[in-house]
Image (spheres, grey):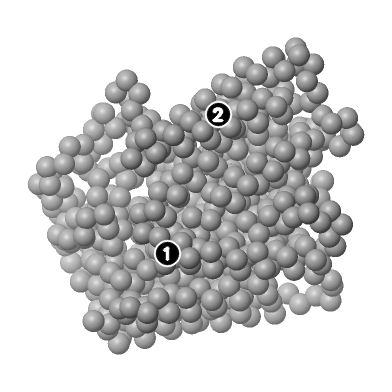
Amino acid sequence: MVDPASTTAFTLVVAGTSLLAIAARRFRVRDELPTLDGWALAGRQFGAVLTWFLLGGTIYTAYTYAAVPGLVYGVGALGFFALAYTVIVYPLAFVLLPRLWQVAKDNGHTTVADYVRARYDSPLLALVVALTGILATMPYIALQLLGIRAVLVAGGLYPDGIAGDFTLVAVFAVLAGATYRSGLRAPTVISMAKGVLVGTTVVGIVVLVLDRLGGPQAVFRAAEDTITARGVPETSLTLTPSLYTAYATLALGSALALLMYPHVLTASFAASSSDRLRKAIIGLPAWTAVLGLFALLGVAALAAGVQARPGNAEAAVPLMVRELTSPVAAGLVFGALAVGALVPAAVMSVGTATLFVRNVYVEYFHPLATPKHQAQVARAVSLVAKFGALAFVFGLPDQDAINLQLLGGVWILQTFPTVALGLFTRWPHRGALLAGWLGGMVAGTALVASGGFSPVVSFAGVHVYVALAALVLNLTVAAALTPVLDRLGVARELGNGTAIGAVVP
């Protein structure tokens, strides 16, 4: 049954942030013609603080805030790999993203595929990077909607039948309209509200739950008893030695993959300078601290004896919040989580639309498209991306969207050699990189499908993240073929002199 107090609190939070998104265009009114850079990157004018909010709000999705504690609730210590990977990723981001930003700014690149095309003088390599980014991101947008729906269903805020579906569509439609009008500025404004809402609500809930359950020591003791009583092998709040390699490779592979997603790169390119981007990255571990509190709530859900349906572990924390807190507090928490989905979903749609326009539409269909026309097409494609995600949610079982997102993580990591290596060296041959990408894509997809869509595969009893195993094959093929192609005299460039060199520090 839907609780009126929870519904009111939830509605106020979502409505308030939606109004902010609608008003985003008024925060910087300029008398200038619309351009793709202005719509997709907000004119590259964000300072360190705005970039920090935008990157944090984009990286830490609503599904992450539901899935990480759900994973801890379901499998125990292995679920904490998300904290390790969000610690690993920021030193890598500090090195790679400002360097990539500088190359993009100096050469007028709007997308990472623009950079790849110019760096290797290869339209084909740019196309596969763009299409990989689009394919990997579409199910990720759908997961944001699934995250909202899972939270609302568990919290008793999702009416049965078409009324509940209409609620989800209405929330998303407001975001779609705001992003269509204001581009990246809309999710940037919401990201500030998200940071405040998510940070304050999770601290309050953790304090309340720990107090209700007798403190941290009692919580961990009760949680360990609960997870042990299940009798499932290799599930414990203490990581078993057999899972060490799975934990380490999941953390490393996820960190490398995250930096290649279009939404992360779009948010990074919007910074006004590489130095301001570095300052924003330095502060991002604060978002990891918030994620750590959510993971702790997964332990608390075990201790509280929450019974989530099999295959629906992400509902454990919302169920606990509904059970242990007042209706108003629960509504505020669920509203904050819903807002948490709006930022990444919007940035993802902007990123995929920009990739399509710059590296598919303009490259192959309309080379003479004006900046204004490119912006108009990108707006339309962003709407298609969002409502395509709705089709995913309503037309496919939830598990199918989750499986596609797992494949997306495998796929996006295969673009890492092409993007990252080009920033530091000219050695890899573009043909070798293309072959490596293909090998990694085929092998990674086959391993995931043959393993029942598990993210971990076993080699001689050693558990390894599938995406990282595919990346090793990718790099091996690229390294082996580069000297072969050079020896055969295969050209590295088309001969038009457009390729750019690696960045010199």
Quadrant location of residue 462? top left
**What number is the disc on residue 395?**
1
Relative image position of residue 366 (x, y in whole percent): 81, 56
Of circles 1 and 2, the one toward us is: 1
N-term mark: 1 or 2? 1
Badge 1 crowding class, 10 Å Cα cut-off, few under 14, some 14 to 19, many 20 or more, is few
Q: Residue at x 17, y 51 (%)?
A: 223
| Vertical arrangement, residue 480 with respect to residue 320, above or below | above
Q: Residue at x 57, y 58 (%)?
A: 348
Q: Amino acid at mark 2?
A: Gly
**What number is the disc on residue 439?**
2
- Quadrant of the snapshot with the C terminus: top right
Q: Residue at x 66, y 37 (%)?
A: 419
Q: Is residue 400 visible?
A: yes
Badge 2 crowding class, 10 Å Cα cut-off, few under 14, some 14 to 19, many 20 or more, is many
Quadrant location of residue 27? bottom right
Residue nearest the observer in this picture, 65 or 125: 125
The kind of secondary structure element at disc 1 is helix
Cα distance in 3D space between marks 1 and 2: 31 Å
- Quadrant of the snapshot with the N terminus: bottom left
Q: Residue at x 28, y 69 (%)?
A: 154
**What number is the disc on residue 318?**
none
User: On the picture, is 379 further left or further right than 256?
Assistant: right
Q: Amino acid at mark 1?
A: Gly
Relative image position of residue 172 (x, y in whole percent): 50, 73
Relative image position of residue 157 (x, y in whole percent): 32, 77
Residue nearest the observer in this picture, 273 or 459: 459
